[in-house]
Amino acid sequence: MSSGLLPGLWSVRLNSLFIFILLLVGGCATAPQPQPEAPLIAELPPETKRPPKNTQRERRSDDYAIIIAEPSDSYESLAESYFGDRKLSYLISEFNNDAPVVAGKDVVIPLKPVNPGGLTADGYQTVPVLCYHKFSPKVSTNKIDVSAETFDRQMAFLKNNGYKVITLKQLYDFVDYKQRLPKKSVLITIDDGWKTVSTIAYPILKKYGFSAVLFVYTELMKSKPSSVALSWDEVKAMAESGVIEIESHTVSHSDLTKISDEKIIKELKESQRIINMKVGKSPQFLAYPYGNFNEKVVAAMKDLGYRAGFTVIRGSNAFFYNKFSLSRSMVYNSEKMGDFAKLLETSQKD
């Protein structure tokens, strides 16, 4: 990362945090807004606005619905009915203190996002983003080669300890102050596009019902099967399965801070074109090669429609973080679960 930009970014983060602390000290009970024009209660994404019509078992205001539960009800079925997405069931369950749905009892359903920034009385929610690169059948001396056994144990740790693996859109909505996330959310990302994503990581992710984002640099991809790199057919198949999201890691994996303005545009624009042609979806998110970026890179990204950028600055992300300097924690080949657990900070106390 550009050394001249880092202090300024941390200054933005610290200033935002200082404002948040002043609001709490002053007794303000409402969540701070990252932009003046943002509404106090953000709207749900359009695709989730599908609440059912009023029924005899429901009482409703503009902000909440209270229903009398039926035997067939669950938080997932209610989320499907009211939000159009079963994965948003946590918005209802957490609002009801995760109590079981009992027939004949009331269930409160928030119709508008509540506390989208994940603020608490003594702090705020943070979201870790894990960054993998390569995987190996056995333990390797290569620092970035995570063995299949270790990766499986890490995914089991997430599942057994109540972590919720989220999508890229969910993280974006959180840092865009639109939607609260599950309390222990984590995003899994993988860089480059090595063959072991398909042979090792993909089946393990499917085993645990998890998803991940694959940031590919297009020159690595092969048209024909390879023992080292993924083919575009493999990339497309994983994307179509819903397990893997495909986003940009540029064309050649060049350090964007060390090339001309013209080459920056080419690296960003050509990556979008190729991925759209091969996968059918134009990327809107970028993982910076080597984690490096500067003002010129960000300006070019915005012009081309990129919505966020990921560094390799270790740490978790709060809702007030700059969307073009999101943190990711590199995962290395340590077999110690304690090392992995340290990467999973989901709240910050103040």
Image (spheres, rainbow, N blue to C red):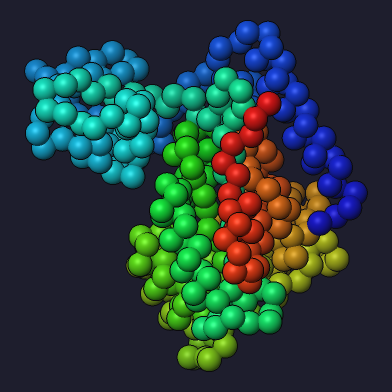
- Front-lying residue, 84 or 67: 67
Query: Vertical placement of 311 versus 27: above or below?
Result: below
Residue 10 position within the rendered picture, expressed as x and y whole percent measured from the top left: 80, 39
Q: Is residue 78 left or right of residue 226?
A: left
Residue drawn at the location 51% of the way across and 69% of the way down: 151
Kindly identify the residue that appears in the image at 66 percent across and 73 percent down.
144
Give the residue at the far right of this rendering: 4
Q: Residue at x 28, y 43 (%)?
A: 86
Measured as percent of width and height from the top left, residue 172 is found at: 54, 44
Q: Nearer the viewer, residue 299 or 23?
A: 23
Question: Is 61 above or below relative to 336?
Answer: above
In the foreground, 172 or 337: 337
Q: How many numbered marks does the figure carry?
A: 0
State the quadrant of the N terminus: bottom right
**What x and y, as percent, mark residue 36?**
64, 21
Corner quadrant of residue 203: bottom left
Q: Residue at x 46, y 62 (%)?
A: 155
The C terminus sits in image quarter = top right
Q: Residue furthest top?
A: 27
x then y, percent, for residue 39: 52, 21
The answer to whether residue 307 shows anywhere in this view is no
Quarter occupied by residue 93:
top left
On the question of residue 346 being in view, the answer is yes
Horizontal side of residue 103 vs 24, given as left or right: left
